[in-house]
Image: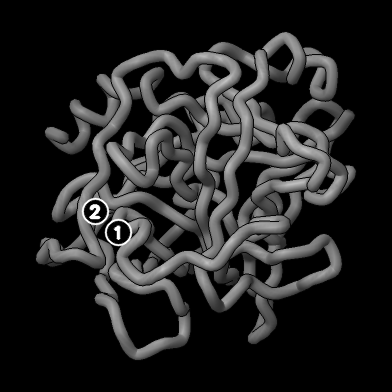
Amino acid sequence: MRCFIVICLCLSLVWGTPLQKGRSKPVPLKNIGPRIINGEVAALGQFPWQAAVHFSGQGFIWFCGGSIISEEWILTAGHCVYEAENATASTGLVGLYEHIGVMSKISDFVLHPGYNADTLENDIGLIKLKEPLKFDENQAAIALSEDFLEDGVHVTVSGWGTTSDDSPNVNPVLNYVELLIVTNDECSKYYPDFIVDTFVCASSGTSSVKSPCNGDSGGPVVINADTNPVHVAIVSFVSDDGCESDTPSGYIRTASYRDWIREQTGV
């Protein structure tokens, strides 16, 4: 089973999502990112930690999700900040093209020094905003997990990724979906010799296929989203069989990098 990174890329003026493929090794080509399959539309303020980030670099532009972790920092996937030269982050909104929310310029990108574009190990990055955000009911930081995410837990994934394998564009409205964490041993059956301890995988857990897909890369994976939200993982990859194949999707465990995040941001 091969897998690809879920990141969104734009060539010329057309939204694309570079899906990196490889034999047990996803290679980031930045074409199209992940999306939410069979998700529900989010309400304004439902996920105040959600960020939308437009990147550019090396002659390309691409789109990823992210999570507000303080007034100055956004947490995202490593393959989102990899080779980025410029970016803008939008927060406090659910509609990408509505004239609400806050658009922020970026002062710095921090890529994990152990990031491997071939294996996606250490697929985590940080974005520093030029001006601090002013928190309100629509934009606020989310707590970061210090604990290893257990198997069999339900999580919430949100993003503006596309909503089917046939769609070339990101979704203009924020969607979310509930997924079920599966064991790394089970996930390894689909991705042999690829899954390491810092990865975690999730599946639909229902008869209806649900998944992130192109454009959802870097987005938040959260437990207790409605009551006591905690960020537990970052959207990283899906299978090249497609987002609608019901093959488990892959994520980076927040707790595995909690010390690194703290060292870089003070959060």
- Image height of 218 relative to 265, above or below: below
Q: Is residue 97 left or right of residue 17?
A: left
Residue 157 makes an appearance in the image = yes
Give the residue at x 24% y 53%: 128
> How many C-alpha atoms fall within 10 Å of the one at disc 1: few (<14), some, or many (≥20)?
many
The quarter of the displayed image where residue 194 is located: top right
Give the residue at x 56% y 50%: 217
Q: CA distance from mark 2 to mark 1?
A: 18 Å
Q: Quadrant of the C terminus?
A: top left
Place of residue 124 in the rendered image (x, y in percent of width and height, measured from the top left): 44, 36
State which tag comes first along the sequence, 2 or 1.
1
Q: Nearer the viewer, residue 158 or 41?
A: 41
Q: Secondary structure at mark 1?
A: loop
Q: Is residue 14 left or right of residue 220?
A: right
Place of residue 155 in the rendered image (x, y in percent of width and height, measured from the top left): 51, 35
- Image height of 149 relative to 246, above or below: above
Q: Nearer the viewer, residue 221 or 113?
A: 221
The quarter of the displayed image where residue 130 is located: bottom left
Place of residue 142 in the rendered image (x, y in percent of width and height, measured from the top left): 26, 44
- Image height of 236 relative to 184, above or below: below
Instruction: Name the amino acid type tagged 1.
Output: Pro
Identify the mark at residue 48; answer none if there is no mark: 1
